[in-house]
Amino acid sequence: MNVFPDFDSLGGIGDLKVFVGALLTIILIVAVLMIIICAIIWAIATSTGNPGMSAKGRGGVFVALGAAALAGCGVAWINWLIGIGEQL
């Protein structure tokens, strides 16, 4: 039994795929920029002895890393779920 979603049955699905791909690209670019900016803030705050700003910079780096990981793994996760759906 081969179960696979029929992506062609919906009108405008090609536009949706283009939109999601563009959105994923923007998210990854913003996440990388956030990592760079927060790492700079973290380094400057640590070197000047400002623990509050250092903690905020460190938190920003970890949040941006998490966002980049989730955005990057989203496509692989969806493909894995579709692969499992085919096996049912």
Image (cartoon, grey):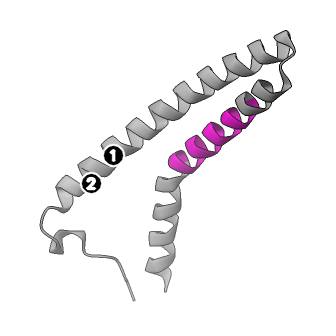
| Disc ID at residue 17 | 2
SS majority, magenta = helix
Residue type at tag 1: Gly
Q: Is residue 23 above or below residue 13?
A: above
Examine the image and state in which quarter residue 59 appears: top right
Q: Relative to residue 72, is residue 13 drawn left or right?
A: left
Q: Position of residue 78 (x, y in %)?
A: 47, 63
Looking at the rendered structure, the secondary structure element under dot 1 is: helix
Look at the image and give the residue range highlighted in magenta.
58-72
Is 40 magenta? The answer is: no
Pointer 1 residue: 21
Q: Position of residue 49 (x, y in %)?
A: 87, 15
Task: Tell me the crowding category of disc 2: few under 14, some 14 to 19, or many 20 or more residues within 10 angstroms, Cα based.
Answer: few
Which numbered disc covers residue 86? none
- The residue located at (31%, 41%) in the rendering is 22
Residue 8 vertical position relative to residue 65 in the rendered view, above or below:
below
- Find residue 2 and report its horizontal and vertical position in percent: 37, 83
Q: Is residue 15 left or right of residue 70?
A: left
Q: Residues within 10 Å of mark 1 (few under 14, many from 20)?
A: few
* SS at badge 2: helix
Residues at discs 2 and 1 in contact (Cβ within 8 Å): yes
> What amino acid does circle 2 point to?
Lys
Q: Is residue 72 left or right of residue 16?
A: right
Residue 18 shown left or right of residue 46 in the figure: left
Q: Quadrant of the N terminus?
A: bottom left
Instruction: Give the alpha-carbon distance from disc 2 to disc 1, as whole Å.
Output: 6 Å
Vertical arrangement, residue 46 with respect to residue 18, above or below? above
